[in-house]
Image: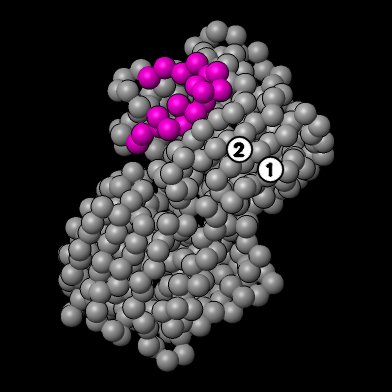
Amino acid sequence: MKKLIINPINKINGIINLPGSKSISNRALLISALINKEIKLYNILNCDDVKYMILSLIKIGIKIEKNNNEYIIKNSYFDINLNNNIIKLFVGNSGTTMRFLTSMLSIKKCNIILDGDERMRKRPINDLVDSLREGGAIIKYLNEENFPPINLKGGYKGGNINIKGDISSQFLSSLLMISPFIKNNININIINNLVSKPYIDTTINMIKNITNIDIINNNYNNFIINNKNKNFIYSNKYYIEGDASNASYFLSAGIIKGGIVRIYGINKNSIQGDIKFINIIKKIGGNIILGENYIETYNNNNKLNNINEDFNDIPDVAMTAVILSLFSNNKNFSTFKNIYNWRLKETNRLLAMKNELNKIGANVIIGKDFISVKPPIKFKNAIIETYNDHRMAMCFSLISLAGVKITILNPKCVNKTFPKYFKLLKSISYK
């Protein structure tokens, strides 16, 4: 399917059963693959990014079995003799898979090439590589310096490590997840301001829940892992909660059209940073109910405020917030700050958002690390280029709530993290 036409949606109402989180799925798979014990993972997300992780783990020898809604990780990466045989792993445009495996494959002698698609080859990985090399890892760039593909040969032993934090928190998460499996104590120092801090909280939370290892977080400036007296008490099962980033589209739909949208699979106790999107909903004037096993949104008065916020902690849902701001009753600019890393995502999201928002009639200003958006005087029908970016497709589908026809090019790009997105949106949409 090369394009998807979404006709005007006049009413939103219904229930969404939210699939598992992509970021939690890939973290759980990686941590479980490092443990020498059988672990069952429930509610793993079925999407391209997770498939790349699973296929890569299987290719290096991890035994993974699927039984209905559970994945069983059968044996440990440490029991695998990788020798010097060259293994080539392809991870598409999955940032988590590329970055997490880079660290994992640095802690055992191996000869592995990690590569991705054309866009992945333009996403820098040098900050992570530099840190791993500091701990003894042998890593070589095969094409362009600082970018995949890379050749890994192991050698990482930890110790005192420095990592830049201003490009992607996934680099730090990657280091933290392998840390309990290093013999030496590890001291990780953060250079520059750490972005997306809530994702680090998620990583530390999962490490604790699965391995019983505590990581000392000194105000996000320094992280200490004491491995001398570690006490592994492995969990033999782990449940992946619904994806908070993906929930943001349905939560916004309920606010925009005033309908009631209830989402099961995520709740107020979510370990994901993007659950903070509920604070954006409150500030813009929407109504939200936080249940024990669901979140529900609606809009009593149909009046929405502008948004002027720093999105350093939650850059992914900042895209949803931009779309939500277009429906503000105040036709002034809303500004979304501290989102420089949009430029290094699946596409350059600052430029992509500007281009497509202009098509639907919005006034847009972008800078090095911000975007300001003024709602259209009148929304326009538009053909939306997605740039093979799943979040562009999902965000701009919501413009149909303005009473216009939106054509999404390459709608299958949502398979990266949310294959059922358009089907679920349709299930709560009415003409």
> Mark 1 and 2 residues: CB-CB less than 8 Å, in contact?
yes
Q: Residue at x 56, y 23 (%)?
A: 135
Q: Is residue 130 located in the magenta-colored stretch of the structure?
A: yes
Q: Is residue 72 located in the magenta-colored stretch of the structure?
A: no
User: Quick one: SS at disc 1?
Assistant: loop
Neighbour tally class for label 2: few under 14, some 14-19, many 20 plus, Cα within 10 Å: many
Residue tagged 1: 215
Q: Is residue 418 above or below residue 138?
A: below
Q: Is residue 94 above or below residue 312?
A: above
| Residue range corresponding to the magenta coloring | 123-141
Please state which amino acid type lies under the numbered disc 1.
Ile
Residue 329 drawn at (x, y percent)? 30, 85
Q: Distance between the Cα atoms at labels 1 and 2?
A: 8 Å
Residue 253 drawn at (x, y percent)? 42, 74
Quadrant including the C terminus? bottom left
User: Quick one: SS at disc 2?
Assistant: helix
Q: Is residue 336 above or below residue 410?
A: below
Please state which amino acid type lies under the numbered disc 2.
Leu
Q: Residue at x 33, y 31 (%)?
A: 121
Q: Is residue 142 above or below residue 402?
A: above
Between discs 1 and 2, the one toward the N terminus: 2
Residue 375 drawn at (x, y percent)? 24, 75
Residue 205 as seen in the image, left or right of residue 349: right
The scheme the figure's colours follow is one colour
Instruction: Confirm whether residue 143 shows in the render.
Output: yes
The mark found on residue 176 in the picture is 2
The answer to which of 33 and 232 lies nearer the viewer is 232
Numbered circles on residues, count: 2
Query: Which of the 4 quarters of the picture holds residue 230?
Result: top right
